[in-house]
Amino acid sequence: MDRFFSQKTCDRCGADLSGGRIMSMYSTDCICLTCKEKEKARADYQAAVKAELDEVKKGNMNFIGIKG
Ligand SMILES: [Zn+2]
């Protein structure tokens, strides 16, 4: 698989990822849950979530188009 699942430490703070890992909402960084909580506290976090959802919607539309 890719680096996301194989790496041992947080891209942002270098902490051990044995306690959990998650993709940053702002980049493809693999970060620890502590860093994720910090992201959630950012003022623009909801905008980042919305941007991500918009991309997913685009992907779904493409998928439906292929099947239809
Ligand atoms: Zn971290």
Image: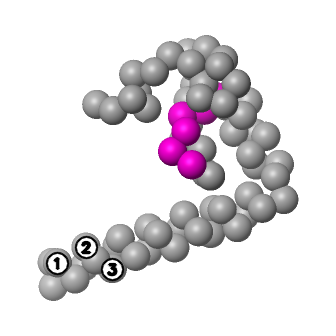
Q: Which residue is mark 3?
A: 61
Local secondary structure at mark 1? helix
What is the three-letter code of the residue carrying label 3?
Met
Residue 35, placed above or below residue 17: below
Q: Which mark is residue 6?
A: none
Magenta part of the protein: which range?
Answer: 27-32
Q: CA distance from mark 3 to mark 1?
A: 9 Å
Give the image's coloring scheme: one colour
What residue is at 45 percent from the left and 21 percent from the top?
7
Which quadrant of the figure has residue 38?
top right
* Residue pictured at 15% horizontal, 85% vertical: 68
The amino acid sitting under disc 1 is: Ile
Q: Position of residue 49 (x, y in %)?
A: 63, 62
Quadrant occupied by the N terminus:
top left
Specify the label residue 63 is tagged with: 2
Asked whether the beta carbons under mark 2 and mark 1 sit within 8 Å of each other, the answer is yes
Which amino acid is tagged 2?
Phe
In the picture, measured across the screen, residue 54 lies left or right of residue 49, that is: left
Quickly name the residue at label 1.
66
Counting residues from the start of the chain, the first of labels 3 and 1 encountered is 3
Q: Is there CB contact under 8 Å for labels 2 and 3? A: yes
Q: How far apart are labels 2 and 1 at the CA level? A: 5 Å
